[in-house]
Amino acid sequence: MATKIKSFNRPTAIAFGDELEELTQTLAKKYGLLIAVKSRKFSSDTYSARVEVTVIDRDGTYCSY
């Protein structure tokens, strides 16, 4: 079981962000999408990130709807 985060500091924010990236890549593979975690920020009690999800066409190109 993971340790509960009581506040964010640089090491916990990095570890959390790394795990978030792993989870988004699992979803990307499952659904055939391109997922990028961007603009990560944290304070002692908040972690925010912008997640960008892009559809990939059958020919491997990215859609820009």
Image (tube, helix red, strand yellow):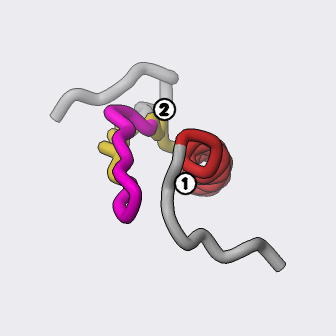
Q: At which x and y percent is residue 63?
A: 29, 29
The quadrant where residue 62 appears: top left
Q: Residue at 35% across / 51% down in the picture?
A: 43
Q: Judge from the rendering whether residue 35 lies leftward or rightward of residue 24; answer left or right.
A: left
Where is the N terminus found, in terms of image quarters? bottom right
Measured in 3D between alpha carbons, the distance from the residue under mark 1 to the one under mark 2, in whole angstroms, is 13 Å
Q: Residue at 32% across / 33% down in the picture?
A: 39
Q: At which x and y percent is residue 9?
A: 52, 48
Q: Which residue is mark 2?
A: 58
Q: Residue at 50% across / 64% down in the picture?
A: 7
Residue range highlighted in magenta? 37-47
Q: Residue at 33% across / 40% down in the picture?
A: 52
For numbered disc 2, what is the local secondary structure? loop
Residue 30 forms part of the magenta stretch: no
Up the image or down, 64 lies above or below 3; here it is above
Q: Which mark is residue 31?
A: 1
